Amino acid sequence: MNILAIESSCDDTSAAIVADGIVLSNVIAGQKVHEQYGGVVPEMASRAHIQNIVPTVAVALQSAELTVEHIHAVAFTQSPGLIGSLLVGAGFAKAFAQARKLPLIAVHHMQAHVLAHFIGNPKPSFPFLCLTVSGGHTQLVLCKSHLDMQVIGETIDDAAGEAFDKTAKMLGLPYPGGPLIDQYAALGNPLAYKFPSSPMLNYQFSFSGLKTSVLYFLQKMKKENTNFIRERLHDICASVQHTIINILIHQLKKAAQDLGITQIGIAGGVSANSGLRAAVQQLGTAQNWQVFIPDFQFCTDNAAMIGITAHYKMLAGQFANLDTTPSARAIWPNE
Ligand code: KG4
Ligand code: ZN
């Protein structure tokens, strides 16, 4: 069974073909237009999706060496995300499904980030605890099976990706700043500057205090030396990244210990961060836990994860229909 999967929740237009749980192709068209604005401009994102979606699907089919006649089901991201962006993907998927008389599968974006772990090998077994860290979310997800997931903790304010991106913006770096901070952090001293990282209760996360503290710190240092950011960029990036990672790893470790879980993983855009990848590996080694980290291409937004989720939903008989509407809010499938 070949599934055509579409992901368009934010600023990447992606299409993938997943055949019986195997990813045949995964094509991502990024949108450079947002770089200059320091964040995603929703209206521009929707317009770019409209321009990108047909060619992206065409390339996904071509790379899988298939044509539209070979597709047996169509999947799309239903929620959460920017509503205009979601509507483009959902509209395309529905039109394709209706034209070809194919079943539709609606996918939850954050559930798909977790299920990116089931694209490659080895795959986690259950129970599996996944720290999902993206531009819009930071969640600890307890997975009892592929489709039975429970969010046991999340951020009460900013997401981890936002903490990276907002720091980058304060440093004058373009959007999205996370990958750049990662790059510069590798050249700096993570202990050069100290920022607050007090742990929250109940597996919660908070990054807004860190953001304010970085802002005040930079204002103070720039008063003393106008070239401070330029001269100490690597150390600033390394120190902020170190603090974000400490906050994340502390809660992941605590939750896994409390629940007695020995299979842990990270997912979402921030799981591409080299410091976080190393820290979670270290945690696994120290605790004798098995650690799962998706390939880079399946960390940030991609349609392969939508396709793999659709594969499990199809096996469970969970189909959508033409009345299934996208939603900006993160409604988990079992809510
Ligand atoms: O999952 P994702 O692609 O989109 C959302 O669902 O939000 O995550 C995007 C986020 C952005 O905040 C981006 O800066 C961050 O992931 N990101 C990184 C890295 N690569 C992407 N953050 C830190 N280090 C990276 N290497
Ligand atoms: Zn995402």
Image (cartoon, rainbow, N blue to C red):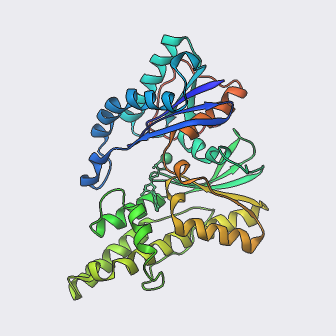
* In the image, residue 309 above or below residue 218: above
User: If the image is split into quadrants, where does the C terminus sit?
Assistant: top right
Depth check: give the residue in front, 310 or 60: 60
Residue occupying the point 66% across, 68% down:
281
Residue 165 in view of the camera: yes
Q: Quadrant of residue 17?
A: top right
Q: In which quarter of the image is ligand 1?
A: bottom left
- Relative to 311, 13 lies left or right: left
Depth check: give the residue in front, 148 or 13: 13
Residue occupying the point 61% across, 46% down:
116
Q: Where is residue 220 in the image (x, y as percent from the top left)?
A: 27, 83
Q: Position of residue 96 (x, y in %)?
A: 47, 18
Residue occupying the point 73% across, 51% down:
122
Q: Position of residue 223 (x, y in %)?
A: 21, 84
Q: Position of residue 40 (x, y in %)?
A: 32, 48
Q: In which quarter of the image is residue 48?
A: top left
Residue 157 in view of the camera: no
Q: Furthest-front residue in view?
A: 65
- Relative to 104, 208 lies left or right: left
* In the image, residue 326 above or below residue 330: above
* In the image, residue 71 above or below residue 215: above
